[in-house]
Amino acid sequence: MVTTEFAFNNKIHTVIKSLPFKVNYKREPRMCFDIRKKGKNEKAEQFVKEMKDRHKEVKAVLVKSQEEMKRYTDRNRKEAEEYSVGDKVLISMKDFLIELMKRVTKKLTEKYKYIRPYVIKKIISENAVELELPVVNVRRIVKY
């Protein structure tokens, strides 16, 4: 774990364009031990001030990057349909074809894009419902 952490901290991050270790400590990571002096130091206070400023800059860059990622992800996202207990839904065959129906012909898969209606037994979250089958993600179902 220590080696992995060192490798991560010693590589330039694509978003902040710097080493994560250097952002946190304003220096390159050490490869060996050295003796540190104790006591109050003006350089240490200056270092703390500079680090706070650097953290603010990095936080702003990361927030901007996060917003860009969200905007990119949301552009093809649509609102999830609301389901309630007792609704009948069909399950999409899209993901099951590869796993369960390897021998089914293409004509059959094009003809039957959804499996028979199932009744929703329980709403687990806005992205998952429990049917007469195991838990299913809502993007695999449509109302009957």
Image (cartoon, helix red, strand yellow):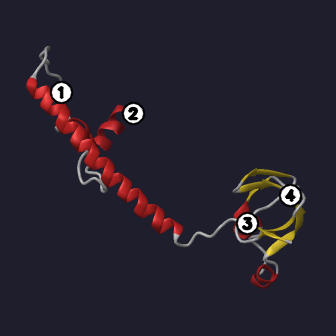
**Looking at this rendering, what residue extends furthest in the bottom direction?**
107
Please state which amino acid type lies under the numbered disc 2. Answer: Met
Please state which amino acid type lies under the numbered disc 1. Answer: Cys
* Disc 3 element: loop
* Residue occupied by mark 4: 120
* Residue occupied by mark 3: 81
- What is the CA distance from the residue labelled 3 to the residue labelled 4? 14 Å
Name the N-terminal-most of marks 2 and 1: 2
Please state which amino acid type lies under the numbered disc 3. Answer: Glu
- What is the CA distance from the residue labelled 2 to the residue labelled 1? 18 Å
Picture coordinates of residue 126, whole percent (x, y):
70, 55
- Nearest-to-viewer mark from 4 and 1: 4
* Residue occupied by mark 2: 1
* Disc 4 element: loop
* Residue occupied by mark 1: 32
Dot 4 and dot 1 residues touching (CB under 8 Å)? no
Please, is residue 88 above or below residue 50 in the view? below
Please, is residue 46 above or below residue 82 in the view? above
